[in-house]
Image: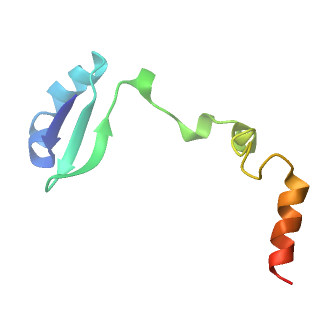
Amino acid sequence: MVEIGAEAARKKLPELLERAHGGETSIIKKRGVPYAALVPLDQLIDPGMSDGLLSLLGTGRGLWGGDVSTTIHGYRDEWE
């Protein structure tokens, strides 16, 4: 992985594109702070390609404990 400043990245864009095509990721920084990543297309995660809410299925498993109704009743008791 290459880390490069924004101005240098502007000057070396053709080289960075070739590296990305070859599978290498580049991090572009502005004043030392990472701002962007130039990644190969096969590593790109496209948010528009997700299944919407179905992609979240199961991500909260265990969040409410073993018995959801007991946990919710416990929270309701806090408000009384």
Instruction: Find residue 4 and report its image quarter.
Output: top left
Residue found at x 86% / y 53%: 68
The quadrant the C terminus occupies is bottom right
Residue found at x 75% / y 39%: 57
Residue found at x 24% / y 26%: 17
For the residue pair 5 and 73, the one nearer the viewer reads as: 73
**Against 65, is 8 above or below?**
above
Q: Position of residue 18 (x, y in %)?
A: 22, 20
> Viewed as shown, does residue 14 lie left or right of 67?
left
> Viewed as shown, does residue 51 lie left or right of 66?
left
For the residue pair 65 and 11, the one nearer the viewer reads as: 65
> Viewed as shown, does residue 50 lie left or right of 44?
right
Q: How is the image coloured?
A: rainbow
| Residue with the most extreme bottom position | 80
Instruction: Find residue 54 and report its image quarter.
Output: top right
| Residue with the most extreme top position | 22
**Against 10, is 35 above or below?**
below
Q: Position of residue 6 (x, y in %)?
A: 15, 47
**Against 27, is 80 above or below?**
below
Q: How many marks?
A: 0
The quadrant the N terminus occupies is top left
Q: Position of residue 62 (x, y in %)?
A: 74, 44
